[in-house]
């Protein structure tokens, strides 16, 4: 959502597994998929989700898409399927979304500024909270 707001490009967040249910029709050499691929190696479910994510990323690559992954430091498996990787420190599963949010926010900021957008004053910004 932040990427849409500050850079005015169409971007959509979704669970990795949903990519194969419709959005896969968009996959081509022009599409960049940014994915959260960090895992807690001490958590079985986290590792299972990671393995499924790798499978989807291999599918994206097979369709010509490009992949930027946010992964856990020292995780070399993701290097096999990603065109670019941003590493975050190892953490428990429940903290991984917080660590992943930081590079995503920075990505949105830098993408917008490189394209000449004013990130401090996005057009049509409406505040949700109004104080009286």
Image (tube, rainbow, N blue to C red):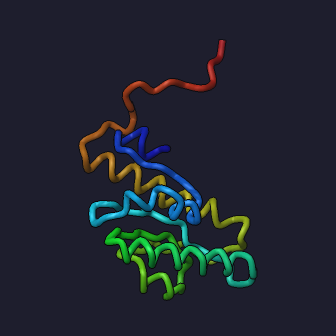
On the rendered image, what quadrant is the C terminus found in?
Answer: top right
- 32 in relation to 50, above or below: above
- 117 in relation to 93, above or below: above
The structure residue drawn at horizontal position 51% and vertical position 62%, both measured from the top left corner, is: 19
Is 81 placed left or right of 50 in the picture? left
Q: Nearer the viewer, residue 109 or 67?
A: 67
The structure residue drawn at horizontal position 37% and vertical position 28%, both measured from the top left corner, is: 123
Residue 97 placement: quadrant: bottom right
Tally of numbered discs:
0
What x and y, as percent, mark residue 60? 41, 71
Q: Nearer the viewer, residue 108 or 89?
A: 108
- 5 in relation to 15, above or below: above
What x and y, as percent, mark residue 15? 59, 59
What x and y, as percent, mark residue 24? 44, 61
The structure residue drawn at horizontal position 58% and vertical position 65%, both measured from the top left corner, is: 17
The structure residue drawn at horizontal position 71% and vertical position 71%, both measured from the top left corner, is: 93
């Amino acid at each position: 959502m932040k990427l849409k707001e500050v850079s005015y490009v169409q971007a959509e967040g979704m669970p990795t597994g949903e990519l194969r249910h419709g959005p896969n029709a968009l996959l081509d050499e022009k599409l960049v998929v940014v994915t959260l691929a960090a895992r807690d190696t001490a958590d079985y479910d986290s590792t299972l989700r990671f393995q499924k994510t790798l499978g989807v990323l291999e599918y994206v690559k097979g369709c010509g898409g490009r992949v930027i992954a946010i992964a856990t430091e020292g995780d070399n498996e993701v290097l096999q399927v990603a065109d670019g990787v941003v590493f975050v420190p190892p953490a428990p599963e429940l903290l991984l979304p917080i660590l992943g949010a930081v590079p995503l926010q920075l990505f949105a900021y830098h993408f917008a500024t490189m394209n000449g957008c004013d990130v401090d004053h996005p057009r049509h910004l409406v505040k949700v909270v109004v104080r009286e």
